[in-house]
Structure formats: C-alpha cells, structure tokens
Image: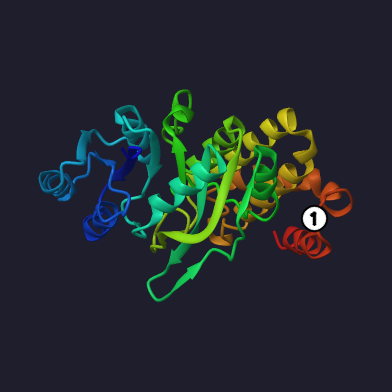
Amino acid sequence: MQDLISVIVPIYKVEAYLDECVQSIISQTHKQLEIILVDDGSPDGCPAMCDAWAEKDSRIRVVHKENGGLSDARNAGIDAATGDYIAFVDSDDWIVPEMYEKMLAALKSENADICACNILSCFPDRICPWGCREYAVGEPERFLEMVYSDTSFPVAAWNKLYPRWMWEDIRFPVGKICEDAFTTYRLVHSAKRIVQIPEALYCYRIRENSIMTSPFRLQRMDEEEAWRVNYEFIRENYPNLQKRAFDFYLQKVNGLIHAISKEQREEFAVQYRFLRRILSKNLTYILFASGLGLKQRVKFLVDYFTL
C-alpha cells in the first residue's frame, strides 16, 4: 500500500484560484492522499467551494475555522493530519502532477527526512524557474549553508515533503509573516539527511498587492525578527556557519530598510531608525570582516549612504 501524504491547503479569499489549486492536487500520480482544505474563515465563496470539492473526492477533508491567518490555518491542518508525510500547498498556487511521486521516491532512495524540489515563479505574463539547481543530498549543515549563502535551498514550506513526526513539536508562528523562515531552520536541524531534486514541480503564483510586493507595512518587521532568530540559532548550534548567517541577516536588514520609501519614512520612523542602527553598528564589519564579496560590500556602502 502506498504511503499516505497529507496535503494541507490554507484558504482565504482565493475564489479565482482555488479550483486550479485543488485540481492540481487531486490529479497527482501518487493517489494515496489526504487533502485537508482549511477554510480560514474566508468571507467569500471559498467555504462552499471547499465543501463542493469534498463531495467530489473522498480524499478531501474540510476544516472550517475562524480567521486566524496563514500560520494558524496551516497549524490547524497539521493538527488534523493523519498521513505518513505532510506537504503544504498555498491556495493560489498549483503543483505538477508528478510532484509527490517524484519527491517520495527521492526520499526513499536517499533515506532522507526532507525532500525539496525546484520552483516555478509564475508571473501574470511569464513563468521562470527560481534557478537551475543541481541534485543535492547531505546532512543539515550543508543545507543550512545553502540557505545562508545563495538561498539555493529556499526556506519555503510548500516545495518540500516531510515525515509527519517532524511536526510533533513545531508549529508556524501565529500572527507573523515570513512564517517559513521561523520554522525551516528548525526542521532542517531535526533531519538526519536531506535531498533536493532539480525538477521544478511547484508553481508559485506571483500576485500584485501581496504583503511582499506592496508598499512597506509594519508586518514586514517580522522578517528582521525571523532572520535574527535564525542567526542566533546558528551561532549556538553551527558555529562554522555563524558568519554566513550573520551576513545573510544583515543583507535582509538592508533590503528591508530600502523597502521603506522616502514617502513612508515619517510613518515608519521608529522602524527606520531601528534598522539603520543595525546597519550603522555593523558597517565596519560589513566592509572589512564579513564574508561578502567585493561587489556586495560596495553595494552595502552605496545603499547605506543613500539612506
């Protein structure tokens, strides 16, 4: 009998995309699925659409709950899951039919705890892969190094397949964005072996007016916290990667402060000053002691003096 995979789909105000998402899951070549649609108190037609899908396919279960945000919805799905493995699909995205068949095969062949695949970024007018990644397999430290150097191992939860036991003590942080960055390093740390396959099997829809593509919002400060927590964990557990993780954190801070437009600096003065203090305190380190390349250090310097 095939291993049961619990696929968790958090749903909120995605009427235009939900059918395509669910159809891509029920069309998987790996048929032994438990598809958990978590209606996160969606005020539109999504709750009824979820119930309609459950009537069409016995593998679909619907969880209706009050709105609590993406992390809370995912956590509700984890609590309801009974599968041998857990996977996530965001409800405005879709997946390639062979996704779970190929990922499960890689997990088994490599005796790994986590499998990741490549991703297609799907813009309204074009589709492009995140990068031509080679097949990679190894221990957690290798993959954490990939996260904090060139992000060739994305922290996204949804391009991965995990055994359910990994989620016994881990949940997404309720009320925060950048939720994957708060959790992935802990999951990687708990794995004995990880595999990443180069096939682009997850289709990530890029939408206008998302939190990450719209003007700066206060929630974006969760990014600073997420990557700071990452660095603090790495400093304690993987000292060989400490500099990489800190450099990566500073790059995230630099990107975050430049997301605050000049027109928004008065509104977000407290956040702007906080981020600038971090850069000011570490400018000498960035220029003379970091592991960043020359071009990256020059960019930091130019960026700093444009603040």
Q: Residue at x 58, y 30 (%)?
A: 190
Q: Residue at x 50, y 48 (%)?
A: 106
Along the viewing direction, whichever of 195 and 141 lies nearer the viewer: 195
Residue labelled with disc 1: 292
**In the orientation shown, which residue stands out farthest toward the front?**
1
Q: Is residue 277 left or right of residue 78?
A: right
The location of residue 303, given as percent across then percent down, is: 72, 61
Above or below — where is 204 with respect to 172?
below
The location of residue 267, given as percent across then percent down, is: 52, 50
Within 10 Å of disc 1 (Cα), the crowding (few <14, some 14-19, many 20+) is some
The reply to whether residue 268 is visible in this rendering is: yes
| Residue 78 location, quadrant | top left
The location of residue 300, given as percent across then percent down, is: 76, 59
Q: Amino acid at mark 1?
A: Leu
Q: Is residue 204 left or right of residue 252?
A: left
Q: Residue at x 52, y 41 (%)?
A: 114
Along the viewing direction, whichever of 301 and 159 lies nearer the viewer: 159
